[in-house]
Amino acid sequence: MLDTYREIETPEGVELRLRVAGPVVRSLAWAIDLLIRGGVYLALASTLSLLGKFGWGLLLVALFLIEWFYPVLFEVYRHGATPGKRSMGLCVTHDDGTPVGWSASMIRNLLRYVDFLPFLYGFGLVSMLLHPDFKRLGDIAAGTRVVYREAKQNAVALPAVEARPPRFSLGLEEQRAVIHFAERANALSPERMEELARIILPPTPSHSASAVQELHATAGWLMGKKN
């Protein structure tokens, strides 16, 4: 497969499409996080050094806590994304697409130091290049993957028509087609809209109204629009 989309079916029967992230974009996200941590370390060192040996002791404790828990806290409490990942549009999820939890995040980040061997994430890079989902060793052990975050889409306003139920039952695909038809009301000419609507709803003696208006009314009803 040339794309990096992976289809996952949830226990409820809903199919999710996740786009896994490759080594390059993940490296850029890691570099951004490294710069952020470096800035924090520098600021702490400049401040705590004024306290002498006690300050240096506090600095070592702070370095340990930040280095180990910086990614974990962000991944668990910030929807699977450190600042670096968020800036690159990435996040960490379980293999089934659910949000990453404490245990999985701890495992994948504890094994970062194995991935780092022998230097500059050598093992991790080789693992990502060989794995179909670009997983480093920590991801394999934790059952996680790094994917692109879905961009939020603004809801499309449906035409201002009184909502009415369809004159006959519609299957799931037919319902989607009617809703998509109404969402494209401003993208097509009135003549083209009427032509397409008549294919779906041919005129009958008992239904001589505009097929376009009827489909728009049905779309509003399917979307739960209130009159």
Image (spheres, helix red, strand yellow):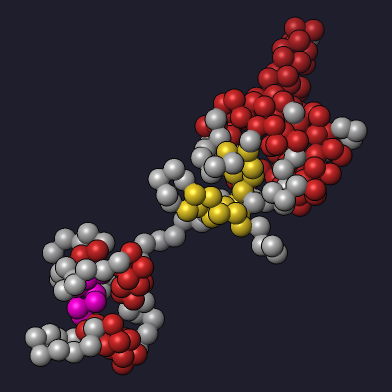
Residue at position x 15%, y 69% in the image: 164
| Residue 203 vertical placement versus 172 (above, below) | below
Residue at position x 80%, y 28% in the image: 113
Observer able to see residue 109: yes
Indicate left or right for 74 with 113 as reference: left
| Residue 209 vertical placement versus 13 (above, below) | below
**Total number of numbered labels?**
0
Residue at position x 76%, y 31% in the image: 112
For the C terminus, the image quarter is bottom left
Q: Position of residue 101 (x, y in %)?
A: 55, 30
**23, 153: nearer the viewer:** 23
Indicate left or right for 90 with 219 as reference: right
Q: Position of residue 133 (x, y in %)?
A: 69, 49
Q: Residue lying farthest left?
A: 206
Q: Tell me which segment is drawn in magenta.
A: 213-220
Q: Residue lying farthest right?
A: 118
Q: Position of residue 166 (x, y in %)?
A: 19, 71
Indicate left or right for 105 with 11 as reference: right
| Residue 127 vertical placement versus 191 (above, below) | above
Observer able to see residue 160: no
- Residue 109 colored magenta? no
Q: Residue lying farthest bottom?
A: 191
Residue at position x 53%, y 50% in the image: 8
For the N terminus, the image quarter is bottom right
Q: Position of residue 36 (x, y in %)?
A: 70, 36
Indicate left or right for 198 with 119 as reference: left
